[in-house]
Amino acid sequence: MAKLKIICAPDDRLREISEPVENVDKALQKLMDDMLQAMYGAYGLGLAAIQVGVPKRVVVMDLSGEEEPAAPQYYVNPEITWTSDEQNTFKEGCLSVPENFAEVDRPEKCRVKFLDYNGKAQEIEADGMLATCIQHEVDHLNGILFIDRISKLKRKMILKKLTKAQREELKGHAL
Ligand code: GNR
Ligand code: NI
């Protein structure tokens, strides 16, 4: 099975607007399977295709606890059709912004329309962690990272750390 590599910020690919999927076919299901493996391998709760360099509107998620059986969720062409006026604050992280966490305000609840793993149309209402995660993932499809939703100062600090880490990784390869 192809092991997909997760892209870290700063990287221009994470700023791309992903394209809608035309058909949920075998190839797309294979991509979703591979994304799920990459997500589990990195201990993430969700993953958007652009995080592995594929600019398609595809998200996988699993919010089950460590002691619980796996509960994969698949969202193709997710569209947020409604958000609550009430906001919620969650400490967010991102596999593309490793080791950095910050409080982010978002609508507490949302409704989302999408196609499932079999290409069937679905619509759900989400709250709590699910609502936060779905909004975080749909942001990725639009080239937005959670650090765009925090203060400019915090964003600059995080980006500086990530750039430094990337430089040191490059140096490591040169040795
Ligand atoms: O693993 C993840 N944890 C997380 C925690 C709080 C809010 C959102 C997330 S999603 C993130 C995985 C990820 O980067 N998805 O794009
Ligand atoms: Ni993320």
Image: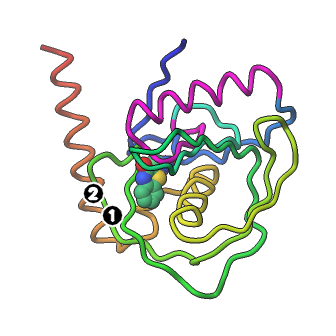
- Vertical arrangement, residue 107 with respect to residue 170, above or below: below
Q: Residues within 10 Å of mark 2 (few under 14, many from 20)?
A: many
| Residue at the (81%, 60%) spot, across then down | 123
Q: Position of residue 65 (x, y in %)?
A: 43, 49
Q: Position of residue 26 (x, y in %)?
A: 79, 20
- Quadrant in which residue 156 is drawn: bottom left
- Vertical arrangement, residue 5 with respect to residue 96, above or below: above
- Quadrant of image for the C terminus: top left
Give the side of residue 61 with respect to residue 126, left or right.
left
Q: Indicate the secondary structure of the residue bearing disc 2.
A: helix
Query: 112 or 143, which lies in front?
Result: 112
Query: 136 or 151, which lies in front?
Result: 136
**What is the C-alpha distance between the residues marked 1 and 2?**
5 Å
28 drawn magenta: yes
Q: Position of residue 59 (x, y in %)?
A: 63, 44
| Residue hosting label 2 | 158
| Residue hosting label 1 | 155
Q: Are marks 1 and 2 in contact (CB under 8 Å)?
A: yes
Q: How many marks?
A: 2
Q: Residue furthest left?
A: 175
102 drawn magenta: no
Amino acid type, callout 2: Ile
Residue span colored magenta: 25-51
